[in-house]
Amino acid sequence: MPGQIKQNSGAYLIEIHITEDFTIRQGRFRGEKLSAGYYYYTGSAQKNLRQRISRHYRKNKTLHWHIDHITSYTGNVIANCWIFEDAPKETECHIAESLISGFNFRSVIKGFGSSDCKICQAHLLAGKESPLPLQIFSRGRKKFLRGIKVRIFTEE
Ligand SMILES: [Zn+2]
């Protein structure tokens, strides 16, 4: 079936459009402010990748991951999501690194989404005022992407 993920595991990058200046209201990062713009969150799932991503899109959920404190608000919209099929866990860090080095993205909240990561400052990065082009990871392939198929997530 086209669009189906064979192993249903891998890494992902979600693009979140924060449409109005936003302050996190609960949890460890309560009080942290994010100004309107595009933000990028990387993660991975060794199983149930599709379900994990669908959950990010849902507004109504138990707040479990750091990112839930952002995605559960109506004004914060997931604009796009890239899937790195069957990629190993460290790919999430490589994605973050490549956005920092290649696009001058920056972490805004230290430790956000990266509690279990020793390399990255955060797995949430602030982008620019406009979204990333959809084909960004299929052109000019990076070394870490070798053998990894990147596709745009679409909800079924
Ligand atoms: Zn990392």
Image (spheres, rainbow, N blue to C red):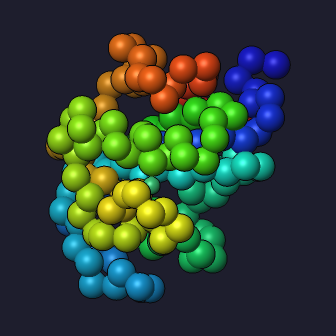
Quadrant of the rendering where the C terminus is positioned: top right
Farthest residue to the top: give it: 139
- Residue 27 vs residue 147, the one in the foreground: 147
Q: Indicate left or right for 100 with 46 as reference.
A: left
Q: Is residue 138 visible?
A: yes
The quadrant the N terminus occupies is top right
Left/right of residue 90 with respect to residue 104 in the rendered view: right
Query: Where's ligand 1: which quadrant?
Result: bottom left
Identity of the residue drawn at 60% across and 24% down: 148
Q: Nearer the viewer, residue 126 or 58?
A: 126
State the count of labels.
Answer: 0
Residue in view at x 44 percent, y 63 percent: 118
Q: Position of residue 131 (x, y in %)?
A: 28, 36
Image quadrant where residue 114 sits: bottom left
Classify residue 146 as left or right of residue 135: right
Counting from the top left corner in percent of width and height, residue 144 is at: 48, 29
Q: Is residue 85 above or below residue 76?
A: above
On screen, residue 83 above or below 50? above
Q: Residue at x 55, y 25 (%)?
A: 150
Asked if one can make out residue 75 in the rendered structure from this viewpoint, the answer is no
Up the image or down, 125 lies above or below 142; here it is below
Can you give x and y, in whole percent of width and height, for residue 76 in the image?
37, 59
